[in-house]
Amino acid sequence: MNILELIAKRYNTKKYNTDKAIPQEKIEDLKEILRLTPSSINIQPWKFTFVQNPEIKTKLASVSMHNTEKINQAPLLVVFSVADDLDAFQKVVDNELPQARRDWYNQIKASMPEADLKVWLSQQVYIALGVGLTASIALGLDSTAMEGIESDKYMDILNLSAYKPLFAMAVGYASEDDFNRIEATPKSRRLLENIIEAI
C-alpha cells in the first residue's frame, strides 16, 4: 500500500481486539520512528512513555475520561509529554544538543514570555502525534489519538516531574465489530477544493 492508501484506510479506533498482541519488533520500530520525529530547530522537547504493563495501563485508563475502555482494551498506550520544567529542560539542551542548536534555543527562550515558550514546545509534540498515527497504520496497527486525559494524574502515575503529559495514543488491532471501521462508518472529510488552495 502507498502512503495515500494507508492514510485513507486509517481511522480513530473505538474498540480493540483484546486477544491480539502487538509483535515486540513493531513496538521497537514505533519507538525509533517517534525518536526520529522532526521538530522546530530540532529541539525535541518530549518524552514518549510506552505503557504495556496492565496494572499501570488500568490506572491511566481510570483517569482518561471517555477513553477508559479503549485504553483497557489496547495492548499499548503511548503517552506524549512535553518538557514543562524549563530549568530541567535547559540541562537537556546544554548536555544533549550541539552548540548551534543551544544558541538558537537560548535566543528563542530569551525573546518570548515563558507561557509562549511552553506553547511553542507543546506544538512540537503534536507533530510527533501525527507521525505516531501515520507510523501505526504503516506498521499494520490501529490507533486512537486521545487528548481526553487528566494530565496531572498521569504525571503522578508515571512518576513524571519535568515532563507534562499532553495526550496519549492507544495502539493495537481493531475489533471486527468496531463501529468506527471505514467499512461501517466511511471517512468524513471536507472537500479538497474547500481546504486546498493552489497558487
Image: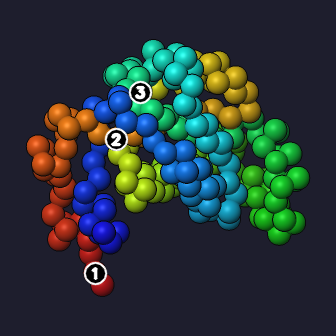
Q: In x, y percent, where is residue 164?
A: 63, 32
> Can you tell which quarter of the image residue 107 is in?
bottom right
- Give yes or no for contact between labels 2 and 1 (Cβ–Cβ under 8 Å): no
Q: Nearer the viewer, mark 2 or mark 1?
A: 2
Task: List the residue tagged with mark 3.
Answer: 71
Foreground pick, 110 / 136:
136
Residue type marked 1: Ala
Mark 2 vs 1, N-terminal side: 2
Q: CA distance from mark 3 to mark 1?
A: 40 Å
Q: Is residue 67 visible?
A: no
Looking at the image, is 3 positioned above or below residue 190?
below
**Quadrant of the snapshot with the C terminus:** bottom left
Eyeballing the image, is 91 above or below 84?
below
Residue 173 is marked as 2
Kind of residue indicated by mark 3: Ile
The image shows residue 154 at horizontal and vertical percentages of: 57, 23
The residue to which callout 1 is attached is: 198
Residue, x 54% and y 31% (percent of image)? 52
Residue found farthest to the bottom = 199
Q: Quadrant of the N terminus?
A: bottom left
> Residue 167 at what x, y percent from top left?
49, 36
Question: Badge 2: few (under 14), some or many (20 or more) residues near its Cα, within 10 Å?
Answer: many
